[in-house]
Image (cartoon, rainbow, N blue to C red):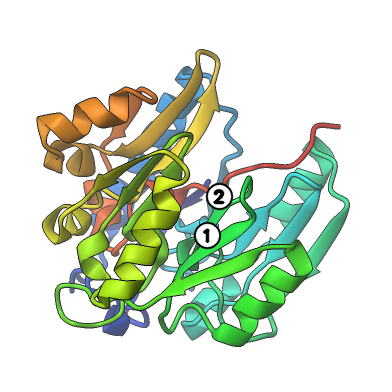
Amino acid sequence: MIRPHHFRPNPQTAADNAFQLPVPGHPELAARAFAEVTAVAGRLTAAGVRVHLFDDPDTRRPDSVFCNNWITTHADGRVVLHSMHAPNRRREPRADVVDALRAAYRVTEVIDLTAGPPLEGTGAMVLDPDRRTAYVSRSLRADDTALATFCARLGYRAHAFDTADRTGRAVYHTNVMLCLATGLSLVGLDLVPDPRQRRRLAEALAQRGEVVALSTAQVAEFAGNALELTGTAGRLLAMSSRGWRSLTSRQRRAVERHLPVLALDVPTLELAGGSVRCMLAGVHLPAR
């Protein structure tokens, strides 16, 4: 996790992010964001999730809190550094974060793709490592060439599809409309306008287990922006309180059949168009 000292919604990402609000940055907003990250890290730690928290005092990185976009880690020990679409987000990759991972885990290789076209990590891709599938909403944040390079290097196959958000634009990141957990998927199928692509996606997800279909309104509330984590009591699903509140009682029961939910308050951070899952770069590296 990255705790920003100068958080603000990024003007360079607003054009293609329908989830982002046009809120000007100011010290009070930054202070609230700092407090929200601190609280989330504390609650995850209390649940037994191992958290690596890094501070970011750089004023030039307004939404560095969404660190899953520039770094992914993998069970074979590889770390991938990804290229970002917005020019000011290309400053986010940090050598000290990679060095800390090297010190704590077994890192076999660092693959640096930052000089290439954009593929914004597990924002642009929702990865299913068991089935070696990368689910991708085609967008400005997910270049086809970069996706092919990632899949070839990491041994994934791409399952790409076209989307349209509530404004008619492509969904900027796949992870706001799709969450994969053990035996469970949360997905905004209504955002896939092509019926053949929608059916193909639904069938692929059904092979993994139960599918909870989210409405477009629920996706806008960040109900799909969730991540399975492991704590001392086992698996849990981290998502925002806002997203959890948007689910119906039936949908909640479906989720809780598979794993408990840790609902987290991040209303300030959500102004920038991302939520809890966007804040978390999962660590899948082998232990030393």
Nearer to us in this view, 63 or 161? 161
Residue 20, horizontal then vertical, whole percent: 24, 69
Mark 2 or mark 1: name the one nearer the start of the chain: 1
**Nearer to the camera, 30 or 189:** 189
What amino acid type is highlighted by mark number 1?
Thr
Which residue is found at the position 21% from the left and 73% from the top?
165
Residue topped by disc 2:
281
> Of the residues shown, which amino acid type is indicated by label 2?
Ala
Residue 237's mark? none
Quadrant in the picture for residue 112: bottom right
| 264 relative to 258, above or below | below
Q: Which mark is residue 122?
A: 1
Residue 29, horizontal then vertical, whole percent: 25, 56
Q: Residues within 10 Å of mark 1 (few under 14, many from 20)?
A: many
For numbered disc 2, what is the local secondary structure?
loop
State the CA–CA distance, disc 2 to disc 1. Answer: 8 Å
